[in-house]
């Protein structure tokens, strides 16, 4: 993940790549949210702190809501799946469950590494 997906300048991970490691354009936050929980690798705890800061800071522009889909430059893609009602894995818009999950993950992050 570090070699092929970490976007250091953005403080986020990319989601998908081709077989020859070219990053695909889609950016979402699901992978960013779960890397430490899945691996327990300390590097992902450090990355989780960076990701949490990036996402909570960027949420200020969206009335403190975290958007689910992003362009390759990590700006919100407000049109992604806007007219698609059948994709439950990548639904359009702000999702209540997604906001709740982010709140839970921020609390878990604080438990692992309390910040003032």
Image (cartoon, rainbow, N blue to C red):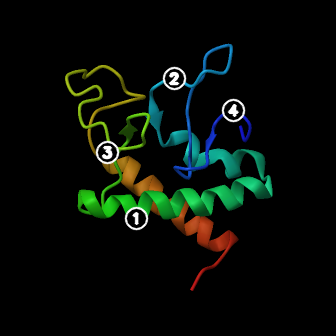
Cα distance between the residues tagged 3 and 2 = 23 Å
Residue 1 versus residue 36 in the image, above or below: above
Name of the residue lying farthest toward the front: 9
Q: Nearer the viewer, residue 95 or 75?
A: 75
Q: Nearer the viewer, residue 59 or 10?
A: 10
Cα distance between the residues tagged 3 and 1 = 18 Å
Q: Residue at x 80, y 52 (%)?
A: 41
The residue that mark 4 highlights is 4
**Residue 108: x, y in percent?**
60, 65
Q: For the residue carrying disc 3, how many other residues have a C-alpha within 10 Å: few (<14), some (14-19), or many (20+)?
A: some
Q: Which badge, 2 or 1, is on the more N-terminal residue?
A: 2
Q: Quadrant of residue 73?
A: top left
Name of the residue lying farthest toward the bottom: 116
Q: Nearer the viewer, residue 54 or 66?
A: 54
- Discs 3, 1 touching: Cβ within 8 Å: no
**Residue 87: x, y in percent?**
35, 22
- Discs 4, 2 touching: Cβ within 8 Å: no
Question: In terms of secondary structure, where does tag 1 sit?
Answer: helix
Cα distance between the residues tagged 4 and 1 = 25 Å
Q: Which badge, 3 or 1, is on the more N-terminal residue?
A: 1
Q: Which badge, 4 or 2, is on the more N-terminal residue?
A: 4
The residue that mark 1 highlights is 57
Cα distance between the residues tagged 3 and 4 = 28 Å
Q: Which badge, 3 or 2, is on the more N-terminal residue?
A: 2
Q: Residue at x 37, y 48 (%)?
A: 97
The residue that mark 3 highlights is 95
The residue that mark 2 highlights is 24
**Residue 86: x, y in percent?**
30, 19
Classify residue 88 as left or right of residue 30. left
Residue 69 versus residue 56 in the image, above or below: above
Question: In terms of secondary structure, where does tag 3 sit?
Answer: loop
Question: In terms of secondary structure, where does tag 4 sit?
Answer: loop
């Amino acid at each position: 993940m570090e070699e092929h997906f970490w976007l250091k300048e953005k403080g986020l991970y990319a989601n998908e790549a081709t077989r020859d490691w070219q990053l695909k354009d889609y950016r979402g936050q699901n992978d960013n949210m779960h890397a430490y929980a899945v691996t327990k690798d300390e590097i992902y705890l450090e990355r989780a702190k960076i990701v949490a800061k990036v996402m909570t800071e960027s949420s200020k522009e969206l009335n403190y809501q975290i958007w689910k889909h992003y362009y390759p430059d990590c700006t919100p893609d407000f049109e992604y799946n806007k007219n698609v009602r059948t994709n439950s894995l990548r639904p359009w818009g702000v999702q209540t469950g997604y906001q709740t999950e982010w709140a839970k993950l921020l609390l878990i992050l604080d438990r692992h590494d309390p910040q003032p």
